[in-house]
Image: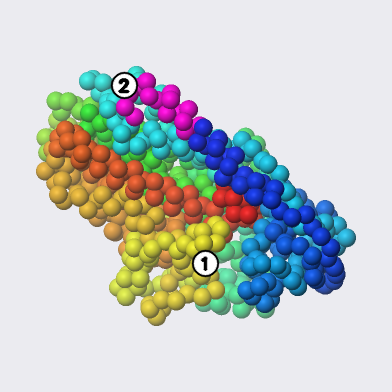
């Protein structure tokens, strides 16, 4: 971008390019099909089998370029599997990969074939093993002209992506506009862009949650009535409203008679004999069921919801609300770090840092896994981010030994509430030490004169922490036991031992495992096959769908390797020890997750925030380097590296979102959306 005057012209050029792509590229099948020869004669034989209808075409008197397949007697939003076999000049009985047609996506009804010469012995198998249909409702034709489709959603999506990339190119004027005024307030010119940035994140979050959550309230009602773990927070709300901590669901008698009720094999055997079943992922202690998930969401959301509506709350409702608040706090955190490290930072670098932080935290996995398992994660992410923002704000405003009390108190409340959501986030409590390093050195804490500051931090921990400890005590007779070892899981967590042999596998899988991709939509696949697990560790290790090591999912985080080289400048900004703390805490949580839990993308959330936080601090510090600021070549190289690594981070996280390997795949939750992406954005047929 050479100047402001060039911007409207550039935007017009981008729009023309997208319009050209829409007409010429995305609608290429239409233009191509105009040249197809009209069908001649052929013989068709239809055979109806138990789970399929087989259509055989013999000796077609024309070259088959495509076929149009429509099944009238079938749900419009459900795909119909189709298998095609034919012979041509190069291959006899060539069996093509299985494909599908879905009525709600008209583009999928046209199947483009790529034969070598003329086709003979064409066989089309239309499967009906899920939904039965009348074979007479199948409509088959050949060499049809595909309709010309001007997809508004596609144009808008591509325009938004193109505009974002254009305005963040290294030559963009956004890198010349300072984010802050001299008084460290947001520049009036930049304020709309800050709002636009957070708004785009919120739109992505809300649309993802709605796309991946179950329709209406039927899902949570069914889970609540059946006693599923998906409604366990609503069960906890019921228990609190009845005045006790244990859940109102009766545990089967055989659990109390077992020598070890946490042995999954023994439970399964007794269940077969008695016909009674225990609840999976419920905590069990002394004849009662308990919720071992962090209690804070139950108190702050599920219980008020039940009081007001009388109904169980959907987990997706909480995830939507907590996620939106997290995104707002994430932007505030980036602003606080920029203000502390580089007051001359540009709005362009700020936007890149914001994108890198949101996607690098892998928080989006909570939006597309709207189950009970991610509720503690997103709530903990919200509270630790809010706590860091409050404490950084308090440190920024400290002067002459005086620190505003409200942000100190708010920060402490948020940090201890995070512990009440997911205990592993208790490590963030210690972040007070590096955040207030300057104040501690200046004796603004832990002295008689600074007693008020110290109490503002400690008292919320003591009050809320005491409540959490008491809650543990009345449940498990131990104030320090949050109940994970009493969980009725598919493994006996009481019998799990720690060892160093599985650490190598775990560290590789969590940090360095390459992303598994192949040329088959949706392209991203889990590195763990549920049917077969191949690894060198000869022992049990829990795996769930995982899509790559953190440094492959968020390569922007690799900037942490510069941390020690930036030691001097980071110390000047009083954030060097925050970076060191984040790295050490991430390693600690990584080891705890490997030893106590296993390998799962939701466990990556425990340490991903710490790694990306350290990386963002380092990046922000590099951006303030005079050598970078005053050298145009170095500045462009730096910004180019930021753009490329951030783009890969975004693509990786968006890609795994639509993967079939997810526990709750988009393919089944919203087939319309899944196949719309396939046939309208990727234009595969």
Q: Secondary structure at mark 2?
A: loop
- Up the image or down, 332 lies above or below 555; here it is above
Q: Is residue 387 above or below residue 423?
A: above
> x and y percent of residue 239 in the render?
58, 49
Tell me if 83 is positioned left or right of 616 in this view. Answer: right
346 w.r.t. 217: above or below: above
In terms of secondary structure, where does tag 1 sit?
Answer: loop
Percent across and percent down for residue 336 are 29, 33
Mark 1 vs 2, N-terminal side: 2
**Coloration mode:** rainbow
Residue stretch rendered in magenta on the structure: 1-15
For residue 117, say whether it is visible. Answer: yes
Query: Measured from the top left, where is residue 387 in percent x and y?
Result: 34, 38
Residue at the spot of label 2:
187
- Whether residue 670 is visible here, answered yes or no, is no
In which quadrant is the N terminus drawn? top left
- Residue found at x 45% / y 28%: 11
Which image quarter: residue 481? bottom left
Q: Residue 12 colored magenta? A: yes
**Would residue 638 appear left or right of 550 to someone viewing this image?**
left
């Amino acid at each position: 971008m050479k100047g402001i005057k060039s911007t409207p012209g550039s935007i017009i050029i981008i729009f023309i390019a997208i319009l050209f792509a829409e007409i010429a590229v995305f609608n290429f099948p239409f233009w191509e099909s105009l040249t197809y020869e009209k069908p001649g004669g052929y013989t068709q034989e239809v055979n109806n089998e138990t789970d399929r209808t087989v259509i055989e075409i013999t000796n077609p008197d024309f070259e088959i370029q495509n076929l149009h397949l429509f099944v009238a007697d079938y749900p419009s939003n459900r795909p119909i599997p189709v298998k095609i076999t034919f012979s041509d000049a190069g291959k006899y009985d060539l069996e093509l990969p299985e494909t599908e047609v879905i009525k709600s996506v008209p583009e999928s009804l046209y199947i483009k074939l790529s034969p070598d010469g003329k086709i003979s012995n064409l066989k089309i198998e239309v499967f009906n093993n899920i939904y039965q249909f009348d074979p007479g409702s199948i409509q088959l034709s050949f060499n049809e002209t595909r309709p010309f489709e001007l997809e508004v959603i596609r144009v808008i999506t591509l325009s938004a992506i193109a505009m974002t990339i254009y305005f963040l190119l290294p030559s963009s004027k956004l890198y010349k506009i300072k984010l802050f005024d001299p008084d460290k307030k947001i520049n009036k010119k930049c304020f709309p862009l800050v709002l636009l940035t957070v708004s785009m994140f919120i739109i992505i979050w809300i649309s993802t949650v709605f796309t991946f959550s179950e329709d209406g309230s039927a899902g949570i009602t069914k889970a609540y009535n059946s006693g599923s773990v998906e409604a366990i927070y609503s069960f906890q709300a019921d228990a609190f409203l009845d005045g006790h901590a244990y859940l109102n669901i009766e545990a089967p008698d055989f659990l109390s008679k077992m020598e070890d009720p946490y042995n999954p094999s023994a439970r399964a055997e007794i269940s077969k004999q008695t016909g009674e079943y225990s609840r999976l992922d419920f905590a069990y202690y002394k004849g009662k069921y308990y919720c071992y998930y962090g209690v804070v969401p139950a108190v702050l959301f599920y219980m008020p919801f039940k009081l007001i509506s009388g109904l169980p709350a959907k987990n997706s409702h909480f995830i939507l609300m907590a996620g939106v608040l997290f995104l707002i706090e994430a932007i505030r955190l980036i602003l606080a770090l920029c203000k502390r490290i580089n007051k001359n930072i540009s709005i362009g670098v700020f936007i890149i840092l914001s994108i890198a932080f949101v996607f690098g935290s892998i928080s989006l996995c909570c939006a597309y896994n709207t189950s009970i398992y991610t509720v503690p994660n997103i709530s903990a992410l919200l509270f630790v981010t809010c706590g860091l923002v409050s404490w950084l704000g308090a440190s920024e405003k400290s002067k002459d030994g005086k620190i505003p009390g409200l942000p100190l108190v708010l920060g402490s409340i948020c940090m201890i509430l995070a512990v009440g959501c997911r205990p592993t986030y208790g490590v963030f409590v210690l972040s007070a030490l590096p955040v207030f390093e300057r104040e501690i050195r200046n004796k603004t804490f832990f002295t008689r004169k600074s007693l008020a500051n110290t109490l503002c931090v400690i008292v919320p921990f003591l009050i809320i922490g005491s409540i959490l400890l008491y809650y543990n005590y009345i449940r498990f007779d131990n104030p320090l036991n949050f109940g994970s070892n009493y969980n009725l899981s598919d493994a006996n967590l009481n019998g799990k031992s720690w060892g160093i042999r599985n650490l190598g596998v775990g560290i590789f899988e969590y940090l360095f495992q390459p992303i598994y991709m192949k040329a088959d939509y949706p392209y991203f696949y889990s590195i763990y096959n549920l049917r077969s697990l191949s690894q060198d560790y000869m022992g049990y290790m829990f795996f769930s769908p995982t899509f790559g090591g953190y440094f492959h999912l968020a390569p922007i985080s690799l900037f942490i390797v510069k941390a020690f080289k930036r030691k001097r400048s980071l110390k000047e900004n009083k954030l060097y020890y925050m970076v060191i703390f984040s790295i050490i805490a991430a390693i600690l949580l990584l080891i705890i997750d490997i030893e106590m839990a296993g390998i799962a993308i939701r466990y990556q959330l425990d340490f991903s925030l710490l790694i990306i936080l350290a990386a963002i601090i380092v990046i922000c510090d590099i951006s303030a380097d005079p050598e970078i600021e005053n050298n145009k070549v170095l500045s462009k190289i730096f910004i180019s590296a930021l753009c490329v690594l951030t783009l890969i981070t975004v693509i990786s996280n968006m890609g795994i979102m639509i993967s079939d390997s997810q526990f709750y795949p988009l393919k089944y939750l919203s087939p319309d959306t899944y196949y719309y992406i396939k046939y309208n954005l990727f234009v595969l047929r």
